[in-house]
Amino acid sequence: MPANLPPEYHKIEAELRTARTPEEKIDIYERLIAVIPHHKGTDKLIAMYRQKIAKAREEGERHQATARHAPIYKVERSGSGQVVLVGPPNAGKSSLVKALTGADLEIADYPFTTRFPAPYMMPFENIKVQLVDTPPVSGELMETWFPEVVKMADAVLLVADLTDPDAASIVEGIVGRLKDRKVELVRADTDVPPPYFPFRKRSVLAANKIELEGSPRAFQELGLLLDGPFERLAVSAADGQGLETLRRAVFGLLHVVRVYSKIPGQKAGKDSPFTLRVGSTVMDMAKAVHKDFSEKLQYARVWNASGLDGLRVNRDYVLADEDIVELHI
């Protein structure tokens, strides 16, 4: 008896070519069984997929048992956001972290000086952003725990070595390897909805060592060769070229606004702003200040550089970077 498989079956079956984990395979097998017509002509086919599901589950259990013995690294988030540095050996990640934060890092000319993820605080105007230095990676070299560190971060700072003629292919290899592990690097201006936050990371590429001979030309060639969605910035950890632009770009990756709280009758203090996600409202700020404010808030007044001078607004007013807000309960 013919199977008479519908067109949807073949579309789903094609996904098996890219399935890498047991979980992905099980999902595809179950979807295939769901669209296969159930009659005598398909009994063997359905039985085959059920056997494959059983084998995939066994494989998944073995992987989980192995993973329990693998090292797991979690860096607690601090400051206004967490940005993880990702790059190949000797690209200068640690040198960039030292230049941006002023921290005293161990730096050497040989690879793998950095062995574990380590957090440092980068000042940007009146806030601090957490930078996480990491061991080197490439398309072929990536610890099993590394993508999980990236998933937990708010954004990614890619680092490339302009003195390496293979810089473009190395970066593309890293991006591809992360994508295989369900981490997609996207443009800095990409809106990442919360449900996708662990899997899509806003990114910028720091092309390091621009001070060396031949690097400016290499930077231009990198732009032509690299097929990536992220912005490319020429920088030098050695002499400081481009570092202030990089600081601002890192801040931009976070998609946050700085908001200052003002007590009625007093001046606003700008030393410790609240950092809220872009699109946050007066009510979101009230919740950040104290739950009593969110429960009893009546209205707010807003001052900013765009010309607002104590404008009375409601709780749904969307805040902009460096707004001064006076909450009234």
Image (tube, rainbow, N blue to C red):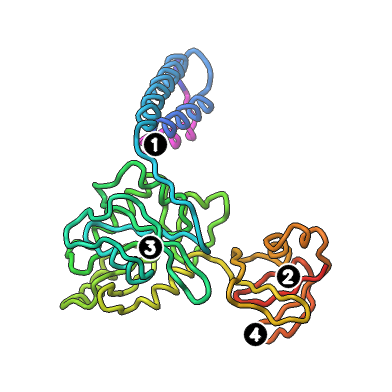
**327 with respect to 155 (left or right):** right
Q: Residue at x 30, y 62 (%)?
A: 105
Q: CA distance from mark 2 to mark 4?
A: 15 Å
Is 265 or 187 nearer to us in this picture?
Answer: 265
- Give percent across and percent down for residue 286: 72, 64
Q: CA distance from mark 4 to mark 3?
A: 31 Å
Mark 3 or mark 2, which has the lower sequence index? Answer: 3
Is 237 or 220 nearer to us in this picture?
Answer: 237
Q: How many marks?
A: 4
Q: Residue at x 29, y 58 (%)?
A: 87
Three-letter code for the amino acid on which mark 1 is drawn: Ala
- Give percent across and percent down for residue 37: 53, 22
Mark 4 element type: loop
Query: Which residue matches tag 2?
Result: 317
Q: CA distance from mark 3 to mark 2?
A: 32 Å
Query: Which residue matches tag 4?
Result: 306
Query: Which residue matches tag 3?
Result: 157
Three-letter code for the amino acid on which mark 2 is drawn: Tyr
Three-letter code for the amino acid on which mark 3 is drawn: Leu
Three-letter code for the amino acid on which mark 4 is drawn: Ser
**276 with respect to 227 (left or right):** right
Mark 4 or mark 1, which has the lower sequence index? Answer: 1
Mark 3 or mark 1, which has the lower sequence index? Answer: 1
Magenta span of residues: 4-20
Mark 2 element type: loop
Q: Residues within 10 Å of mark 3 (few under 14, many from 20)?
A: many
Q: CA distance from mark 2 to mark 1?
A: 48 Å
